[in-house]
Amino acid sequence: MTFQQPSLDTSPKVSDEVRKTTCYMCACRCGINVHMKDGKVAYIEGNRDHPVNKGVLCAKGSAGIMQVNAPSRLRTPLKRVGPRGSGEFEEISWDEALQIAADWLEPIRRDNPEKLAFFTGRDQSQSFTSFWAQNYGTPNYAAHGGFCSVNMAAAGIYTMGGAFWEFGQPDWDRTQLFMLFGVAEDHDSNPIKMGIGKVKANGGRVIGVNPIRTGYNAVADDWVGITPGTDGLFILALVHELLRAGKVDFDYLARYTNAPVLLDAETGLFLRDDNDKPLVIDRNTGDLAPFDKPGIRPDLRGTSGPHRAVFYQLIERYLSPDYAPEAVAERCGIPAPRIGAIAAELARVAFDQAFTLPIEWTDFRGETHPTMTGRPVSFHAMRGISAHANGFQTCRALHMLQILLGTVEVPGGFRFKPPYPKPVEAHPTPHCHAKPDCPLDGPHLGFPRGPEGLALKDDGSPARIDKAFTWENPMSAHGLMHMVISNAHAGDPYKIDTLFLYMANMAWNSSMNTKAVTEMLTDTDDDGNYVIPRIIYSDAYSSEMVAFADLILPDTTYLERHDCISLLDRPICEAEAAADAIRWPVIEPDRDVRGFQTVLIQLANKLKLPGFTTDDGTARYADYADYITNHERKPGIGPLAGWRTAPEGSGVGGSPARGAATGRGSPNPDQIDTYIENGGFFIHHIPEAAQFYKPWNSAYQNWAVDLGLYDTPQPYLFQLYSEPMRHFQRAAEGHGDRQPPAHLRDRVRTHMDPLPYWYESNAREGEFTITALTQRPMAMYHSWGTQNAWLRQIHGRNPLYIPQKLWDTHGFAEGDWARVSSPHGSITVPVALHGGLNDNTVWTWNAIGKRKGAWALSDDAPEATKGFLLNHLIGELLPPKGDGLRWSNSDPITGQAAWFDLKVKIEKTAPPADAETKPGFDPQHSPVGKGPQDLAWKVGK
Amino acid sequence: MTDLPAKTDRKLGLVIDLDTCVGCHACVISCKGWNTENYGVPLGDADAYGAAPSGTFLNRVHTYEVTPKDGPAQTVHFPKSCLHCEDAPCVTVCPTGASYKRAEDGIVLVNEDACIGCSLCAWACPYGARELDQVAGVMKKCTLCVDRIYNENLPEEDREPACVRTCPAGARHFGDFADPDSNVSRLSAERGGMDLMPEQGTRPVNKYLPPRPKEQIDVLAPLLEPVAETPSGLLGWLDKALEKL
């Protein structure tokens, strides 16, 4: 056939309209352009103007259209009619559903609000849900942080006033060496991918520290396949090497950290002046001076009588041969010369490649600096180092490393994002005093400064169902959602009446010990009543958890709702700007579902909760959009910072002042519309001179006050030595009114060490010698991706990956199966070889395995037949110690779920006769039926 | 059976950087989304929620593990779509003229109205870059987003393939290889852009940039010099370390 080509329209119409909102296919909160055709969602792409993703979008985000049409979407409120776990429901109206919920919740509030446990999972509206819980009056509220990465967040706040991800990010444009420890690669994923791309394009290098070489570690220039749980030891060996060589930023340490602060030789607490300010020795005069006195030069070698600067303790500890590379190499699985070489590389880039920016700035002591010094080394870490029982101290160690290098809040290093930096003193402390018919006495969650901040009742017993803020885990800043069901079932510390959960698949992948948890949810007492009497659950989809609830309040998808990504919560700021965003209904639901936050408001109005209703019982807010617009946390500060109303004559933006105020201002009824007109987000840039050295930079501090992030400037020192930890430690040494019980005294004394240290968190027990981990695929978010017709084609199976050495030892071949057991249980699963893997570690993808009947999949879907969870091997409790106590499998400081401390044994086994993974589960009845056979989804003509 | 154009004015294609591709599949799904809604019939998904879901994708990411002699195993993520070959065997094999290579820019397309679904082209393609849509029975392949790159209804900055626009790591680049000064020609020249399976004689337009050498931190390089030879002498260390302050 001779050459011919048809004519082609290369400019077809793309869409009728583009609606800009915020993604919720994971926790990343990217901006998206939703292309609409005939009122339907036709295509989703990244929003180029958005601060988080700048136009790019990951696989999950682009697959949003398949989430919005997913057959797994719940359609109407449901009332359980079969036994719990069966999935048999009756469809009911919203009036009936809200009445049932109110009839359960009203008496609890009147008699004893602690009988409600309200936990909200992967909630992005925590400032709202916590406000609801506070006004309801229960002490039992938290979101999912305790089983996610509270160690990273809390260690960051206590050490330097912020951590990674929404707290801060590398200076991607200038960093030349990026060192990445273990992270969940499914979220904060676009910024990290963009950052890695930038570092490489700028000629920089990436070091990946992770037992598993996938994803980011696959493109890392150097891969350190560390033994799981030893990151802290490796980091402290780097610290040892840097200190030994004097390759730390002494000037930075003296000026901006508590290294020069004097410790009282007797108490180990800071020496303070009459105004309670920590004291240092001023090198100019040799005299004691408050740390922030104008003109002083704090002395790292300061002493006063028997009292010495923190720096002495620090070097004594880390110069010890215990932390020498040779001493840690075997344990970490990293040869000593490699540790030394990495330390040298960090030092080389931090100091030999230092640079200055010609930006003048003035510090909190009044000293003006003509330039800003850059140290182009940055770090990032998350779940990989957090989810161990030594995670808090490991995260502290990592923050200490970056501080010693002088790379925090400097050009090229790690930079905070507003509202961070924020010292621990600027955060609330926990509140837990529940009284009948009364709001709680303050916010549930916070950062205790010492034993007085614990959530204990007068008799010393835990005030909270999850035992957060007790001697078992004093600094549990995000609560312990993973312990709620187990504790409620055990009646330890007390029994509850209603368990109210939102958006957390606690009957499957979000719980340790999954099978036992489902048994706890269905267990009955001698009278045949459920041990956990009532369960209310809100989810948008037919997850495994749905079947275990008595009442289902179906949520909308993310394109059908209002939300705010608020500065009061987990905002979308950049290092150079404050920003927040909204979601809005770009489509209306085609089912009888309601946004959960609106449902909470409707419930609050029915219950006439203070905060939501006036004294005469009138509702303040009709729905969540109304709340977003009109709620004021304190006068002038609301959920959204952009386009507020300036007071008349304020001089802000002239008059009329609607939409003219930023940060502080009264509510603006047009605020949400203005956000929509501006692409769904608001951004407010930080002036150039205020963009670095933020904790100490007067220009930044003043900018933050103007915006309403703080009410007064809050300059502070980085806390290499943590005085709050020392307060807890002193209590364990026998000081003060509140002391730990005898069985926890040693544990508190050891673990609340005010300087970072490393301890074994996942010791081998007998035959259980291999660490088993999960990784998050970038194209899935927890259990959500499976219901998505496109994403499940990428990750529909999850073999257990085995390193070459173990593969050979056990004589595995392709297609083989293994029995994997822990002290807690066993699973039988397919295996696959993975060479880029620590020699003594096995792993699988997280949350691919599904229970039959859930997510509107067919019962023979590979997720249900070949997929599996490691959760069956992980106890929420440690094996019994013979003392009759229930010891949680958590970090003893924060209560972070120690997912990655799992040790297993593997054995080759014959494939099960039915070729399905074990344990198997009976199918749940699907309240939404099954999905269609084939899809050919095109909404336009 | 179908002729190729004697020459093409431009040679549009992709540069894919294997050094930065993290294997996130963003390009795969963005492509799926755009091409389901746009050019030709939608990309179908058979057994979408069942035991063996099998959908049409114009771009897939494959993952390979390679173990060098002197280092740990490495993983390479390898996105693969039509390479818009200059000597495209999928075109010449087409019995109906449905497969064709555009004279103006070299893009290889399927005219779905003329496609009989015989799959000869898929057999002829050595790269496995074509997929017969199981729902529609029509041959599908990468269009290089021909309905985006010239589309006057899109802002100019968006006139690039969906996979390039969405790639978070910046591992995908689009341009004209006929222009030696284009971004793709320069990148390919600087980074040693490679043809995929050149021995097939297809003269692919798309180029792959190889991963840079790994594990370059030299364990034999000089270690950090200690401040003092006896670090146990704390005060000596302090004085020496701090003397320059």
Image: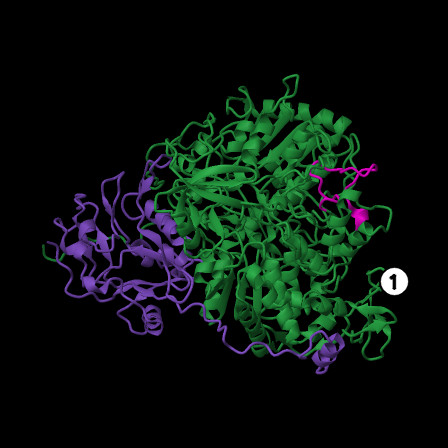
Chain colours: A green, B purple
Asked whether residue A422 appears in the rendered view, the answer is: no
Left or right position of A279 against A86: right
Of A53 and A452, the residue lying toward us: A452
Figure label count: 1
Point out the stretch of residues depicted in magenta.
Answer: A450-473
Q: Residue at x 45, y 29 (%)?
A: A853
Give the residue at mark 1.
A275
Tell me the element at label 1: loop
Q: Position of residue A54 (x, y in %)?
A: 49, 58
Q: Position of residue A317 (x, y in %)?
A: 71, 66
Of A621 and A725, the residue lying toward us: A725
Q: Position of residue A255 (x, y in %)?
A: 73, 72
**Magenta residue check for A472:** yes
Q: Is residue A780 above or below residue A758?
A: above
Of A859 and A460, the residue lying toward us: A460
Q: Residue at x 26, y 69 (%)?
A: B178
Asked whether residue A349 appears in the rendered view, the answer is: yes
| Residue A214: quadrant of the picture | bottom left
**Magenta residue check for A255:** no
**Chain identity of mark 1:** A
The secondary structure that most of the magenta stretch takes on is loop
Q: Quadrant of the C terminus of chain A?
A: top left
**Mark 1 Cα shell of 10 Å, populated few (<14), some (14-19), many (≥20):** few
Q: Position of residue A528 (x, y in %)?
A: 63, 17
Left or right position of A643 against A12: right
